[in-house]
Image (cartoon, grey):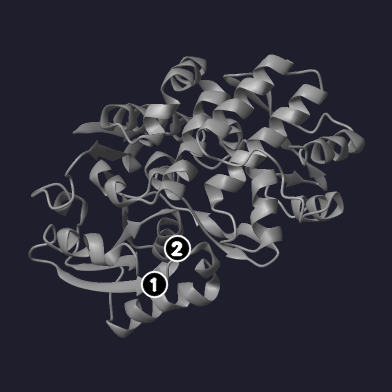
Amino acid sequence: MITLTVDLGERSYPIYIGKGLLGRDGLLLPHIPGKNVLVVSNETVAPLYLDKTLTMLSGKRVEHCILPDGEEYKNLQTLNTIYDVLLRNQLDRNTTIIALGGGVIGDMAGFAAASYQRGVHLVQIPTTLLAQVDSSVGGKTAVNHPLGKNMIGAFYQPRAVIADTATLDTLPDRELSAGIAEVIKYGLIRDRLFFDWLSENIARLVAREADALAHAIEVSCRNKAEVVAADEKESGQRALLNLGHTFGHAIEAGLGYGCWLHGEAVAAGMCMAAIMSKKLGWLDSDDADRIKGMIAQAGLPVNAPRELSVERFLELMAVDKKVMDGVLRLVLLNAIGHAVITDDYKPEQLVDSIRASYEA
C-alpha cells in the first residue's frame, strides 16, 4: 500500500493506494469519528463492493443509499434521494458519508456531506480510474444543471481517500480509457517526465498491466495532492487542472449528460486546447501531434462532435466557472508539461480553433 498526504494543515488527509484495500481491517474505522455511517453507491458498484465495504464498518450503525448509475442522474433531484435517507434515519451531524463509486457518486455524496446540517464527515472510496486519479482527491463536489456542468457545488475535503486498484478489474474498457484521459492531463499541465513515460507505456495502461496502472495512479495522485495543497479553492494554479474541461463540459452539456463519458469529453477538449495553443503560436506542431496521437492510442476521441455547432460551443462555454467579468479564461499549453491560464486571445482565434477541431 502506498500512502500519500494532501497537506492542508489541520485538515490534511491520506490517500491510500493499493490492491485489495477494500475489506482490510483497521483502514477505514480510524477516519470515522461517530457511530453513524451512510454509504452512498450506485446500482452498478453496490453489488460488487458494498459488502466488502460493510465488513470494514464493524460496530457502526450503517445505512446505505443506492442511486441509479450515470452522469444523467447527477442532479438536484437525485441529490434529494441522499438527503431523504439521511433525514429519514435521523442521522446527526457527526455522521460520516462514504462515497463508494466513480466520479458521479463522489461528487454527489461529497456535496451531500458538505451541505447536510452544514457539513458532516466524508470518506471517498473511488472505484473507477478517473475517480482514483482525479475526482476523489481535492474536495471538489457538485451536481450538474441543464445549462452547465458542475455549476452547483462546494469545496469540501474528505477525511481519507481509499483507492483499491482491484476495483479496476471490473471496470469496462470504455471507463478505463476515460480515466486515462485524466492521467494524460497531469503530464500535459505540469509533468513532462510523466508524459514521456506515458508515451512509452500508454499501451500497457490500456492493457491493464498492474504495475503500469499502479505507477500512473501514484504519480497522478501525487501531482493532484501537490496542486490542491498549494491552491485549495482554485484561486490560482489549481485551475490548470481544468485543461480540456471548458471544451469538454460544453460537449457533455451540449450532447446531453451521459452521451459522452466525462473523460471522453475531456480528451477531445485537450485536443481542442492543443489546436488553439498551436494556432496562437505557443505549441509546435510536433507536440500537438504527439498529444493527439497519445489520446487516440488510449482509445479516446480526438475531434469535437459535429453535432455541436461553433455557435453552440460558444454559447455553452460562456456558462463556465472560469468566466470572470464576462471574459472566458482558457487553460492552454506553452509546451508539453507547462500549462497557462489565459484570456489573451481574440474571439476569432477561438472560433477558428473550434472549426479546426471537427477535422478527422
Q: Dot 1: few (<14), some (14–19), or many (≥20) neighbours within 10 Å?
A: many
Q: Say if residue 239 shows up in the picture.
A: yes
Residue 49 picture location, percent across and down = 23, 59
Tell me the quadrant of the picture where the N terminus can be found: top left
Badge 1 marks a residue whose secondary structure is strand
Q: Nearer the viewer, residue 42 or 356?
A: 356
- Residue at coordinates 41% horizontally, 31% vertically from top-left? 220
- Residue at coordinates 39% horizontally, 54% vertically from top-left? 102
Tell me the quadrant of the picture where the C terminus can be found: top right
Residue 85 sits above or below residue 293 on the image: below
Residue type (three-letter) at the residue carrying disc 2:
Met
Choose top left, top right, bottom left or bottom right for residue 328: top right
Residue type (three-letter) at the residue carrying disc 1:
Leu
Badge 2 marks a residue whose secondary structure is helix
Residue 126 sits above or below residue 353 on the image: below
Residue 63 picture location, percent across and down = 23, 74
Q: Which of marks 1 and 2 is in front?
A: 1
Q: Say if residue 95 shows up in the picture.
A: no
Tell me: 47 left or right of 252.
left
- Residue at coordinates 33% horizontally, 59% vertically from top-left? 99
Residue 177 picture location, percent across and down = 47, 42
- Disc 1, disc 2: CB below 8 Å? yes
List the single residue furthest toward the bottom: 88
Question: Which residue was labeled with disc 1?
Answer: 67
Q: Earlier in the sequence, mark 1 or mark 2?
A: 1
- Residue at coordinates 8% horizontally, 50% vertically from top-left? 25
Estimate the spatial distance between the alpha carbons at disc 1 and disc 2, rounded to whole Å.
Answer: 10 Å
For residue 108, the mark is 2
Q: Dot 2: few (<14), some (14–19), or many (≥20) neighbours within 10 Å?
A: many
The mark total stands at 2
Choose top left, top right, bottom left or bottom right for residue 130: top left
Residue 239 sits above or below residue 85 on the image: above
